Amino acid sequence: MAKTARAAIKSQKTAIDLLTEAVIRALQDRKAKDIKLMDLRGISGAVSDFFIVCHGESSTQVEGLARNVEQEVEKETGEIPAHIEGTKNAQWVLIDYISVVVHIFQPEQRSYYGIERLWADAELRDSERN
């Protein structure tokens, strides 16, 4: 593809597209498990446009995933989270970018809280590398 065609495609992406892509790349780089992109835009009363949900295998990995998301998203997009919680015990870390909310769980908490079940009306996409 020619450079101008690639530039045109890139310029058509929205800020939310760029943000979700940066989050997913940061999670993939640190080997997050079962990454899901949930599109909540069609759901009345949704608190955000997108949720990105994944898990890590330990509190150390969950903490590392969260830190990498913060660093890489700021580097790639200039965005900083409006709010972060859960880093103290790293069972469930929530990173809130307002239009995109990132949920990083340990496996037991992900199963227990069932974000994907709770928001079952959302369009759900796997975001694993192919």
Image (cartoon, rainbow, N blue to C red):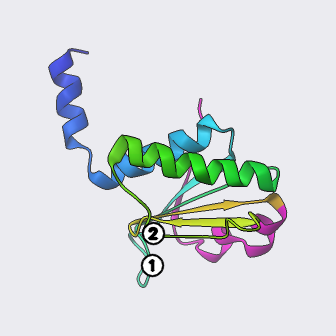
Mark 2: secondary structure: loop
Indicate the position of residue 15 as horizontal and vertical percent values.
28, 52
Task: Indicate whether residue 114 is drawn in magenta.
Answer: yes
User: Measuring 36% from the left and 55% from the top, which residue is drawn there?
Assistant: 79
Part of the protein shown in magenta: 108-130
Task: For label 1, count other residues whose C-alpha is less than 10 Å away and answer few (under 14), some (14-19) or many (20+).
Answer: some
N-term-proximal mark, 2 vs 1: 2
Disc ID at residue 107: none
Look at the numbered discs 2 and 1 and tell me whether their residues touch, using CB distance below 8 Å: yes
79 w.r.t. 18: above or below: below
Viewer-nearest of labels 2 and 1? 1
Indicate the position of residue 110 as horizontal and vertical percent values.
75, 65
User: Measuring 79% from the left and 68% from the top, which residue is drawn there?
Assistant: 109
Residue to which mark 2 is pinned: 40
Q: Amino acid at mark 2?
A: Leu
Residue to which mark 1 is pinned: 47
Task: Indicate whether residue 61 is drawn in magenta.
Answer: no
